[in-house]
Image (cartoon, rainbow, N blue to C red):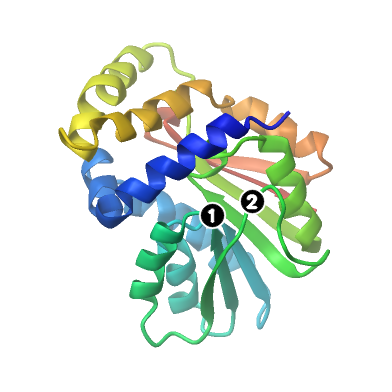
Amino acid sequence: MADYSKEQRVYRVFQSISEGYDSANNRISLGLQKRWKKTLTNKIITNTPQGTHILDVCCGTGDIALKIADARHDLKVTGIDFSPAMLDVAESKRGGRRNVRFRQGNAMKLLYKDNSFTAASISFGLRNTADYAQVLREMRRVVKPGGYIYCLDSFVPDIPIIRPFYTMYFRYVMPMLGGGRKYRREYMWLYESTQRFLHRGELEDLYREIGLKATGHKTRMWGACVLVWGRK
């Protein structure tokens, strides 16, 4: 069941932190977020047929969509997000690129026809949605048979010895590093949403439950960041 109070909170958080979001992500990931996102974009760039369409869900400030568009000029990339403030930042970065566009939309009710895209991705966004299964079903619906659904996100590490260090950093250090005194409370959401999120294995199980095949994953930073994929 969708948690609409969560949806409203997430909307307020991202509306307020959009302007400094990119630089804050670099700080809180200690500069590693670009490598993590490259794991996703490399998969899409390598596996996507020529001249097709990609959907990036919860695109935020557009870095994934723009990276794909720059690497593959033959692809048409659409990024959607429900935060106008985040989309304003994405649009300001788009420049003269003609193979990428940004639109406002809700991940739980995608305004596209069945089988419209060759692949769909969501990065550091699924845990922020009100209904994980519904978002993945919608992504599956709009992807053509044989296409892939990719999810890159933050997870609580599965390795017990790592968890105390992970918790200490994300609960106490990261909010101040990301948001400072002004936005500390907003950046606490990253810790809270990750704590409440599925474990990596549970997400792969959910992929299979909604009918995705050939599921797999790639782990970064001892499981704190994982890319999960599956084929329609």
Q: Name which quarter of the figure residue 38 lies in.
A: bottom left
The residue lying furthest to the left in this view is 181
Q: Nearer the viewer, residue 129 or 48?
A: 129
Q: Name the residue: 36% across, 82% down.
A: 95
Left or right of 39 in this view: 51: right
Label at residue 82: 1
Q: Is residue 155 visible?
A: yes
Using the image, determine if residue 19 lies above or below residue 199: below
Q: Name which quarter of the figure residue 187 lies in.
A: top left
* Nearest-to-viewer mark from 1 and 2: 1
Q: Is residue 127 visible?
A: no
Q: Name the residue: 30% across, 25% down.
A: 170
Name which residue type carries label 1: Phe
Left or right of 72 in this view: 13: left
Q: What is the x, y in percent for residue 39?
A: 46, 53
Q: Name the residue: 35% across, 17% down.
A: 162
Q: Secondary structure at mark 1?
A: loop
Left or right of 228 in this view: 146: right
First in sequence: mark 1 or mark 2?
1
Q: What is the x, y in percent for residue 133?
A: 72, 37
Q: Name the residue: 24% across, 53% down.
A: 20
Q: Which residue is mark 2?
A: 107
Proximity of marks 1 and 2: CB atoms separated by less than 8 Å: yes
Using the image, determine if residue 159 lies above or below residue 19: above
